[in-house]
Structure formats: structure tokens, C-alpha cells
Image (tube, rainbow, N blue to C red):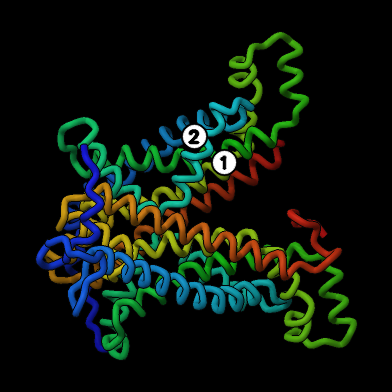
């Protein structure tokens, strides 16, 4: 078979190859479309990551609180709920079921609903990681905080969480890369992200291999970029003498 | 809340005519992908641990490549490529099975690699000392122990795999989720049927992970 990379310079409506691979005056080429799809993938992923980090940190912390069994149970239920139902089903629930139940949600675009679904889904996984990060800290850290007269909020804020977050950077890195991969499931509710682009452009142009190669390449580039950024954060956030380089010991 | 949820449409007849067929495919897909994935994954793990560059390099590229691409893209790739390679169209179901075996092999190989590496070196040396060949050593000494150590992780991966089967939605294969969706469309009750789908996945996966936890405890005591 022969390659035809010209497909990216084609206009999406007339299917004609233009002089420049970027469309002019409101016309868009497949290249334009793909780049905007990449933008949607990155937006969905990053916004979901913010939701996941905030909710995950909260739930993960609540699950380690001493002397509050009901809060812990509630946190566990949250995690079990998200761990035992596939992401695609969560996305359908957020897209079809929740707007039907809560009328206010009807005006929200699908993009926002997917961010909630993916963000909450990932929050359960981050909560689980943070919980094991906090439990991995020596018990003395908590007691030391208490002995200093810190309130529960204070010793979590100043003693436990700063160390726990450093410990879980490696699993957090793979979770961030997972968010990028999982954002592909948004195709199912017609968010115009990379996978959606791949499916539609493949159908319109029948140059599936070129299109899929480019899309796959963008996913790999995104994953690699996340990996480097997280490695940089890990290096900058390291507390000398507390956590050995490359290891999780203390 | 202005929703009238009505479960009366949800009968055994609906379940057996729409959902059961999908559930059957989801389970078959999970079982084949687990067995095939573990087999191929163990092979990949052995290649990566072989110490020979020409075996290590392709296995590493394959595993890392598969792990950095979204499963949906892999499903689309296989659906596009397999008919081109074998020269005739195949169904979405067959394509899904091939995809899941190839994709899960990468994940199972990482688990098996960790399992093999968890075996003390003395075991390898002991095998060599009694004159075993590489194959005998692996088959009779290392792999049985690695499997046993990794059994809970392998089973947990299988549960994740069962959830992942819902992604065959991308190529329109008929799995459990699709069954619920079609039932919901036919009866004009999409909301109830998505809720029922969520509940079914939850019950199945929760029961499975509960059993894995119990098994884990049992194995831990014996060891």
C-alpha cells in the first residue's frame, strides 16, 4: 500500500488539497481539525486532573481520619463505587442520567459532564493512593504533630500531607498519564477529542492508517510530556534526606 | 427531581433477550483475553528478562508502546488493520478478542515480570545446580512460584479487564453494556437501563474483588 500524507492538507468539506495545510478564511483542513481535537483532549484531561486532585485529596484524607468510622466508610464507599463500574458507564451516567434527574445540569455542555465523570472516576484512584501514602508514614509523625498541639487540620496540613504527596508522586504520574488515555472514552458522548477525530476522519477520508498513526503519535507525545513534567516536579519537591532518590523509603 | 423512574419494564424476558447475549460475550472476551494475555504476557516477560538484547528490545518496545496508547485507539487500530492483513473482513467480536489478547498481554507481562523478579535468586541457582535446563527451571521452579505470588494481582487485572470490555462500544460489538443500551432504546427507558447497567457491573466486580481479597488472605496465611 502507499502512503498519502496529503490527507492532512485536505479541506474537510470539499476534500480538496489546498496550497497550505492550514485552512484559510473559515475553512478547515484535517490538520486544523486534528490540532483542535488535541486541544480538546488536553483540556478534558487537565480539567479532569484538577477535579481528581481536589476530590481525591479530600476523600483520601478523610479515609485516614482517626476516630471517625462513618467518614471512613463514606470514603470507602466512594472509592468502591468508582472502582467497580467501568469509566464508559460513568460517562453515560453523567451524560444521560444525571441531567435527566437534576434539571440544572441540562444546560451544561457534554464537555463539562465528561470532565466531572473522568475527574470523579480518577479521584477514587488518587484517594486510594493518597491513603496508602499517608498510612506509609511512620506513626510518630502524626503523634509528633499532636504533641506540638496542632489541631487535626493543622497536623494534616503541615505534617502528614506534604510528605504523603511526595511519596505518591510516582503513582500520581501514571495516574496523570492514565487520565490522558482515559479521556479517549469521551468519544462515546461526541466530545470532539482525538479519538472522535480519528473515527470520523477515518470514515470520511478512508486514509485510516495515516490518521491513526498521527493520532497515536499525539497520544504518545502527550504521555511523554506528562512523564517529563512530573519527573521535574518530583525533583524540585524532593526534601533532602527524607526520601532517597528513586526510592520510596524513609 | 422530576423523574419518574419505572422499573416495571425490566423483566426477565428483556434481560434474557437483550442483556444475556451481551453478558455472555463480555465474559467470553474476558476469559479468552485473560488466558491468552497471561500466556503471551509471560512470554514477553521472559523475553524482557532473558538478558539477550535482540529479545529484550522488541518486547520492551511492544509493552511500553501498548501501555502508552489508549485502549480505544488500540481497538480501532486492530479493527482497521486485521482485515487488511488477513485480506477479508472480520466481525467486531473477533476483532475485539484479538485486540484484547494483544493489549492485555502488555499489562500481564509487567505483572509476570514483577512476579518472576520476586523469586529469590537462590531458587534459580538451586534449579541449575540440580542440572535443570532453562526450560525445566522456568516451568518447574520459577513460574509456579511467580504465578502463586502474583495470583491476586492477576485476578485484579482480570476484573479491570472485564470493565474494559465495555470499550468494544467503539467498534459496535455486542457486549453487556450494548445489551442494556439497546434494551433501553427499544423500551424508551434509557435512564433505567443505564442505571441497571451500572448496578450489574458493580455487583459483578464487587463480588469478584471481594473474592480476590479473601483468596489473598488465604494465600498469605499458607505462605
| Residue at figure coordinates x 53%, y 64% from the top left | A176
| Residue at figure coordinates x 15%, y 33% from the top left | B88
| Quadrant housing residue B78 | top left
| Residue at figure coordinates x 26%, y 47% from the top left | A209
Q: Given the current orientation, which residue lies at the most extreme left position?
A: A14
Q: Can residue B28 be seen in this view?
A: no
Chain for numbered disc 1: B
Q: Given the current orientation, which residue lies at the most extreme bottom position?
A: A104
Q: Residue B41 carries which label?
A: 2
Percent position (x, y) of residue B70? Answer: 40, 54
Q: In the depicted view, which residue is nearer to us: B182 or A92?
A: A92
B7 left or right, relative to B139: left
The residue at which mark 1 appears reads as B111
Q: In the rendered view, would you say A212 is above or below B120?
A: below
Q: Are marks 1 and 2 on the same chain?
A: yes
Percent position (x, y) of residue B120? Answer: 75, 31
A121 left or right, relative to B88: right
Marks 1,2: beta carbons within 8 A: yes
* Quadrant in the picture for the N terminus of chain A: top left
Q: In the depicted view, which residue is nearer to us: B50 or A65?
A: B50
Cα–Cα span, label 1 and label 2: 8 Å
* Quadrant in the picture for the C terminus of chain A: bottom right
**Secondary structure category for the residue under label 2:** helix
Q: Which of marks 1 and 2 is nearer the N terminus?
A: 2
Q: In the rendered view, would you say B140 is above or below A216?
A: above
Amino acid at each position: 500500500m502507499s502512503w498519502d500524507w496529503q490527507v492532512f492538507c485536505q479541506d474537510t468539506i470539499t476534500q480538496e488539497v489546498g496550497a497550505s495545510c492550514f485552512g484559510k478564511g473559515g475553512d478547515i483542513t484535517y490538520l486544523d481539525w486534528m490540532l483542535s481535537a488535541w486541544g480538546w483532549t488536553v483540556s478534558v484531561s487537565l480539567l479532569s486532573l484538577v477535579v481528581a486532585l481536589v476530590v481525591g485529596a479530600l476523600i483520601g484524607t478523610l479515609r485516614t481520619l482517626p476516630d471517625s468510622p462513618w467518614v471512613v466508610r463514606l470514603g470507602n464507599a466512594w472509592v468502591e463505587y468508582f472502582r467497580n463500574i467501568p469509566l464508559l458507564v460513568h460517562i453515560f451516567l453523567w451524560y444521560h442520567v444525571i441531567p435527566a434527574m437534576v434539571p440544572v445540569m441540562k444546560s451544561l455542555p457534554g464537555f463539562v459532564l465528561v470532565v466531572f465523570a473522568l475527574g470523579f472516576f480518577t479521584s477514587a484512584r488518587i484517594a486510594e493512593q493518597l491513603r496508602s501514602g499517608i498510612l506509609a508514614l511512620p506513626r510518630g509523625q502524626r503523634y509528633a504533630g499532636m504533641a506540638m498541639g496542632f489541631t487535626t487540620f493543622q497536623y494534616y496540613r503541615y505534617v502528614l500531607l506534604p510528605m504523603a504527596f511526595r511519596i505518591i508522586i510516582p503513582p500520581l504520574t501514571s495516574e496523570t498519564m492514565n487520565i490522558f488515555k482515559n479521556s479517549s472514552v469521551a468519544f462515546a458522548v461526541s466530545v470532539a477529542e482525538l479519538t472522535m477525530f480519528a473515527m470520523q476522519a477515518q470514515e470520511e477520508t478512508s486514509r485510516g492508517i495515516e490518521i491513526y498513526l498521527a493520532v497515536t503519535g499525539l497520544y504518545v507525545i502527550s504521555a511523554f510530556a506528562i512523564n517529563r513534567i512530573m519527573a521535574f516536579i518530583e525533583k524540585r519537591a524532593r526534601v533532602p534526606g527524607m526520601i532517597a532518590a528513586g526510592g520510596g523509603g524513609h | 427531581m422530576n423523574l419518574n423512574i419505572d422499573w416495571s419494564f425490566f423483566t426477565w424476558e428483556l434481560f434474557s433477550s437483550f442483556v444475556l447475549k451481551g453478558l455472555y460475550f463480555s465474559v467470553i472476551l474476558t476469559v479468552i483475553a485473560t488466558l491468552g494475555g497471561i500466556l503471551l504476557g509471560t512470554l514477553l516477560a521472559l523475553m524482557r528478562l532473558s538478558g539477550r538484547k535482540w529479545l529484550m528490545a522488541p518486547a520492551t518496545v511492544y509493552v511500553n508502546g501498548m501501555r502508552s496508547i489508549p485502549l480505544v485507539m488500540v481497538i480501532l487500530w486492530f479493527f482497521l488493520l486485521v482485515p487488511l492483513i488477513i485480506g477479508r473482513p472480520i466481525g467486531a467480536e473477533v476483532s475485539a478478542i484479538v485486540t484484547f489478547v494483544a493489549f492485555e498481554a502488555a499489562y500481564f507481562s509487567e505483572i509476570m515480570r514483577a512476579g518472576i523478579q520476586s523469586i529469590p535468586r537462590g531458587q534459580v541457582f538451586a534449579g541449575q545446580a540440580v542440572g535443570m535446563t532453562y526450560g525445566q527451571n522456568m516451568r518447574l521452579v520459577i513460574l509456579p512460584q511467580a504465578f502463586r505470588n502474583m495470583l491476586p494481582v492477576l485476578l485484579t487485572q482480570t476484573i479491570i479487564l472485564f470493565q474494559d470490555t465495555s470499550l468494544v462500544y467503539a467498534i459496535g460489538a455486542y457486549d453487556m453494556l450494548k445489551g442494556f443500551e439497546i434494551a433501553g432504546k427499544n423500551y424508551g427507558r434509557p435512564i433505567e437501563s443505564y442505571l441497571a447497567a451500572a448496578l450489574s457491573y458493580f455487583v459483578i466486580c464487587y463480588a469478584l474483588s471481594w473474592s480476590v481479597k479473601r483468596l489473598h488472605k488465604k494465600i498469605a496465611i499458607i505462605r
